[in-house]
Amino acid sequence: MYKIRFIDAENMKSVIPLVALLNPGVSEKTLLERLEVMMKNDYQCLGVYDKEKLVGVCGLWTLMKFYNGKHLEPDNVVILPEYRNKGIGELLMTWIDKYAVENNYEAIELNAYVENLKGTEFWKKTGYAIRGHHFQKILKKEE
């Protein structure tokens, strides 16, 4: 029913309305500028489609760290509100798990906001364990 595929560079701007749902304090202009830089740094994005309608996105980064080697980092995972609780998140994570295994990743690692209790439960349900704290120091506010 739903199709998952990488979004090509020409269509990457299509993710902005969904990503904006996760970043309500960030302007569309800033999101587009950041997306352009991210794409230059090997950012990829998966799209979940209901026919041709983009209903979910998940950014992907390939990283290498001392403690867990080559790993995949899902980022900015969002499903349109009217498509939530339909199994799309599980479908997407299953796709990512398979992709990671097929491409010789050693782990999958992600960040989730502590206030996102539904997200935390989702990640636990799909096999992720809380391993640490994500610290942030804001140096510049968006204008």
Image (spheres, rainbow, N blue to C red):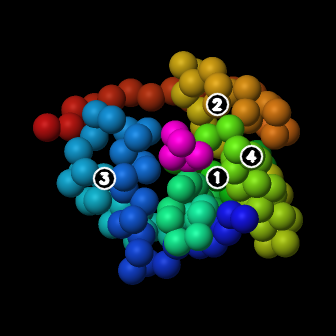
Instruction: Give the amino acid at mark 2.
Output: Gly
Label located before the other in sequence (1 or 4): 1
Whether residue 76 is situated above or below residue 112 in the rendered picture: below
- Quadrant position of the C terminus in the picture: top left
Instruction: Give the amino acid at mark 4.
Output: Gly
Label located before the other in sequence (2 or 1): 1
What is the crowding at mark 3: few (fewer than 14 residues within 10 Å), some, or many (at least 20)? some
Instruction: Give the amino acid at mark 3.
Output: Leu
Q: CA distance from mark 4 to mark 2?
A: 14 Å
**Residue 81 among magenta residues:** yes
What stretch of residues is rendered in magenta?
78-83
Outermost residue on the left side: it is 143
- Quadrant position of the N terminus in the picture: bottom right
Label located before the other in sequence (4 or 2): 4
Q: Residue 28 appears at what percent x and percent y?
A: 25, 51
Whether residue 67 is situated above or below residue 114 in the rendered picture: below
Would you identify the image quadrant in which residue 120 lies?
A: top right
| Residue that carries the numbered disc 1 in the rendered image | 73
Q: Residue 25 appears at what percent x and percent y?
A: 28, 34
Whether residue 78 is situated above or below residue 70 in the rendered picture: above
Label located before the other in sequence (3 or 1): 3
**Residue 65 among magenta residues:** no
Q: CA distance from mark 2 to mark 1?
A: 16 Å
Give the SS element for disc 3. helix
Image disc number at residue 87 = 4
| Residue that carries the numbered disc 2 in the rendered image | 119
